[in-house]
Image (cartoon, helix red, strand yellow):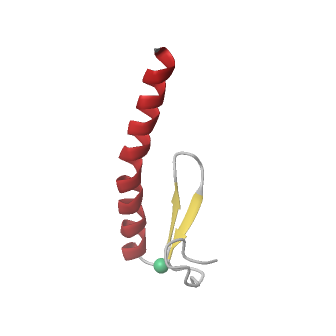
Amino acid sequence: MNCSYCSKQIRPGTGTMYVSRIGAISYFCSSRCYTRQIELKRKLNPKEIRKSVAAVKQQKK
Ligand SMILES: [Zn+2]
């Protein structure tokens, strides 16, 4: 089992398991890796939402 962010090996009993709304499971060795991964997702998501909104608007036209 490796950390999803830094790909370090996580010892059993340590680290955190994060399950997203989609159902994808990711493991993090520390809260630092967890927050960084979530921050990255937050940075990426608005762009994706804008793209999808633009695509929907184009389809309606
Ligand atoms: Zn890590």
Residue 25 vs 57, above or below: the answer is below
The one of 12 and 25 positioned closer to us in this rendering: 25
- In the rendered structure, the answer to whether residue 43 lies left or right of residue 27 reads left
Quadrant where the N terminus lies? bottom right
Q: Is residue 33 above or below residue 9?
A: above
Above or below: residue 20 compared with residue 40? above
The residue at 57%/46% (across/down) is 22
Please give left or right for residue 35 compared with residue 23 in the image: left
Q: Residue at 42% across / 30% down in the picture? A: 54
Give residue 34's position: percent from left, percent from top: 42, 68
User: In terms of depth relative to the viewer, which is nearer, 55 or 30?
Assistant: 55
When asked about the image quadrant of residue 38, the answer is: bottom left
Rendered location of residue 8, percent (x, y):
55, 84
Kindly identify the residue that appears in the image at 48 percent across and 29 percent down: 55
Q: Residue at x 60, y 49 (%)?
A: 23
State the residue lying farthest toward the right: 1
Rendering coords of residue 46 (x, y %): 36, 45
> Where is residue 57 shown, x and y percent of the image?
43, 22
Residue that protrudes farthest toward the top in the picture? 61
Q: How many marks?
A: 0
Viewer-proximal residue among 50 and 25: 50
